[in-house]
Image (cartoon, coloured by chain):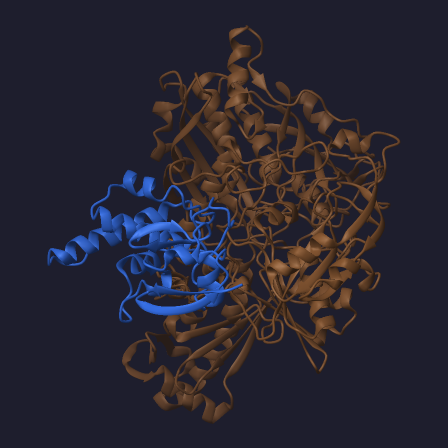
Chain colours: A brown, B blue
Amino acid sequence: MSNPSGRPLSVVGHRLPKVDAWAKVTGETRFADDLALPRMAYAKLLRAQHPHALIRRIDTARAAALSGVYAVITGRDFRPVRFGIMPVSQDEEPLCVEKVRFVGDPVAAVAAVDEETAEAAARLIEVEYAPLDSLMSIEAALREGSHRIHEYGDGHNIHKLVSLEFGDVEEGFREADLVREDVFFFEGNTHLPMEQHAAVAQWTPDGKLTLWSSTQTPHYVHRALGKVLGVPMSHVRVIATPNGGGFGGKSDPFSHEMVVARLAQLTGRPVKTTLTREEVFYTHRGRHPVLMWVRSGVRKDGEILALHFRTWLDGGAYGSYGVASTFYTGALQTVTYRIARYKFEGCRVFTNKPPCGPKRGHGTPQPRFALEVHLDKIAAELGLDPAAMRRRAVVPEHEKTVNHLTVTTCGLSDCIDRVVDASGWRDKFRKLPPGRGIGFAASAYLSGAGLPIYWNDMPHSGVMLKVDRGGGVAAFCGSIDIGQGSDSVLAYVVAEVLGVRPEDVRVVTADTDLTPVDLGSYSSRVTLMTGNAAREAAEKVRGTLFAAAAKKLEASPDDLDARDRRIFVRDDPGRALAFDEAARLAESAHGTLVAAGSYTPPRRAAKFKGSGVGPTPAYSYSACAVELEVDRETGDVRVERVWIAHDGGTAINPLLVEGQVEGSIYMGLGEALMEESAFRAHGLHKIPSLLEYKSPTTLETPEITTLLVETRDPEGPFGAKEAGQGPLLPVIPAVANAVYDAIGVRIDEVPITPEKILKALDLKTQGKPPRVGPERLPHVSFPDPIRVPPPWVDPEGRAAGAVHGKEPIRR
Amino acid sequence: MRTLMTLTVNGDRREVAAPVHRTLLEVLREDLGLPGTKHGCELGECGTCTVLVDGQPILSCLALAVECQASDILTVEGLAEGGRLDPLQQAFAELGAAQCGYCTPGILLTAKALLGADPRPDRDAIRAALAGNLCRCTGYTKILDAVELAAARMVAESAGEPRP
């Protein structure tokens, strides 16, 4: 591995342990629930048992009278201020005041001497409800006359409606050799991090609040706490503790964080709460259930002349990230294959289920499943090899897609080739014995959202560095390690630039008092964004070090290099200074050795409304083949082998990139075959436990072959893109396509359970179309689309109103 | 009502006064200041809270501390001996087998029991031994690799051969 100038790299590209690996294998890492402060009280939230009801009365007297109880609060103990992650969906209360919207909505809370007393007191709180309609499906929520869950949105229980058209899709359908329609459903599921959410709050007598929380987004929690509590943000400090897994489930500001803060203020004690596993299933903000309709027009060779995609999202009870989720169900279909014309209509509906939000792949695994299975059916209909058909259609590099998304590097062709070769695709597809099959799919994902969640012009990530007189380097950054290795990436990049070892770098992260803002561990943004900020900060410090060292070495700073804790003349490495000596010289000459770096993504959003979701500095690409066996008697699917090639740009640490890819495959297999959030008619989760909510164990996880395709993207630090989410995307459709290859049935709905397989086999035996999937679509009147000419007509991407004539078709 | 109990944890004899219904998990974490043992469900479903009692992996969320008084209890804090990491800890760190690290203590201890009983387990035996420990980060692959590496190193060391 070398940098663009050919200089060999000493840290980047090497298979190194994570900087926090030692703390994790010795049990030293302190997660939120591991914290204990003197005089600490324990909090418990009382949650609604009704999915939708007005709160008539809350009586806390018996709870407050229980021995050992310090405080009991309801929503009226907060200012009447709502919060939420998206500025357009400020619809949550710390504790519900007038109405509950899902089983699990918090209505009151207790602080007590210990957890048992807090639980006992919570049970003594009396809440009188007046039940409203229990709206547990999109159809029920849309039904005229049903109770409204929220008073805002784009229609009756409709949170968001989107309609966009890029070029004239009808023209594409007219020109096509084949027009095909399909309907798919992706059931909701949950992140299931092994660590339950936990938070500890402490107020000091000077009126300052510190909150330790298992959160992926300390900056947004900081903002929400300031707003809800009405205290200056300068007096609120949020420290994100290392997350015991997140996967998107710890990305919202949560009620329990507001509640412990308020209880700590009222009691004058530190207050902790840790959610039970059952509470995590309700709090989750998991994968949206999405119903999808897709119509495409293709040429005989598979070239896509027009694609029309509709999505209906079951959003659950609150907004959460839902507006972004809705756009994401339509945004990234276009960044894998050339698509000449594209239309997207999306609709998010409020229901009385726990609110959905972002889970690994945020809003894109559902449409990716639909698109890749749809393409598989098209390939079958046209008699084409589905891998070869995809290979021919791969997007060109350094161009814009029909919906104005800028592709930089794209290693998808290489990914496809490598998976085809490694898996023996050509010898297996349609050639395996009955009951065995192989399936193929490809995908793309963001390396960080191009725009922040709230509109502002500030950097998305900042890094401060300080060099000590002994040669130690401290790196301060708001990013939070959720297991993906962000602390390590920070140390690796700084170490590479300064020529020290990662173990010489002390990282201080995710503390809003001490560290510059990083927006959080979501949208696969941290390696690219924090990495770029770290590189800029380290290059500044290196400039100062080199200036001082050059004087001593009687050389030009431009001729110096840094490596292995030495600063030396590149062409005469014997002329060298130890790093710590250079640090002392630099501090003597220039003062305290500190520097800052920041990163803001390139402004690439087009002009049309809704163009803010989808842009990223660089897209990652993945291709995947899954080989499996189906037991026709039981319907059981056994995945035997997975091959995946991932273009995540330069692998800063290939070991950790592989780990992200393997974890993504595992999670994708769980979603494909077993994981689902299921609810009873009156709002209870059917399976809120780790035993009943099935997830793959060591026994269900197959051998995985991971192939890294390292494009060097100009946008990323040392060419890096992302690895944490993208590799999940192709796994699910590859499983569905492999099931078809194995037994000739189409399961157009995930999870692909044994029941569905047996049902499809039964249909096949009866001579009926062997397909299991959704049969009906809800009725929603989508508005007239915002019509945007493709970039080859209008590079700015301005909405064209009703005017759109003939447009040149890109071939 | 608290009962005085004597527990032997990581070789240390510790006295603690706790209610008899208190689980070993709670006593370790909250009374003995050993929060290295984690919890994922407190219902015996995920394996996260696994510790060794007389060398056997048990779910500390389902065990009563009062019943463990005659036993040797090993937690993740006791795995390293004299500042030297257990070969499993070393291999997990080197191979990236701990991502978020939350399930890691339970998996290390389950693997420790496996290698104690079977120094040369094949991959399927490792899969079987770890089937009760859920991990949501790694896809288990690097965990299986790390147990294999640790086993190979321990076998080589006891045979006086070079370290793999």
Q: Is residue A792 above or below residue A652?
A: above
Q: Is residue A683 above or below residue A90?
A: above
* Residue found 76% across the figure and 27% down from its top: A778
In the rendered structure, the answer to whether residue A331 lies left or right of residue A414 reads right
In the rendered structure, the answer to whether residue A711 lies left or right of residue A323 reads left
Can you name the residue that lies furthest to the top here? Answer: A767
Residue B12 image offset from top left, x and y in percent: 33, 69
Q: Quadrant of the C terminus of chain B?
A: bottom left
* Residue found 51% across the figure and 27% down from its top: A736
* Residue found 11% across the figure and 55% down from its top: B159
Task: Write down the quadrant of residue A545 in the picture.
Answer: bottom left
Task: Write down the quadrant of residue A264 in the picture.
Answer: bottom right
Residue B24 image offset from top left, x and y in percent: 44, 57
Taking depth in this image into account, of A624 and A362 the one nearest to the observer is A362
Is residue A15 something one can see in this rendering?
Answer: no
Taking depth in this image into account, of A653 and A281 the one nearest to the observer is A281
Can you name the residue that lies furthest to the bottom here? Answer: A588
In the rendered structure, the answer to whether residue B134 lies left or right of residue A144 reads left
Residue A435 image offset from top left, x and y in percent: 40, 18
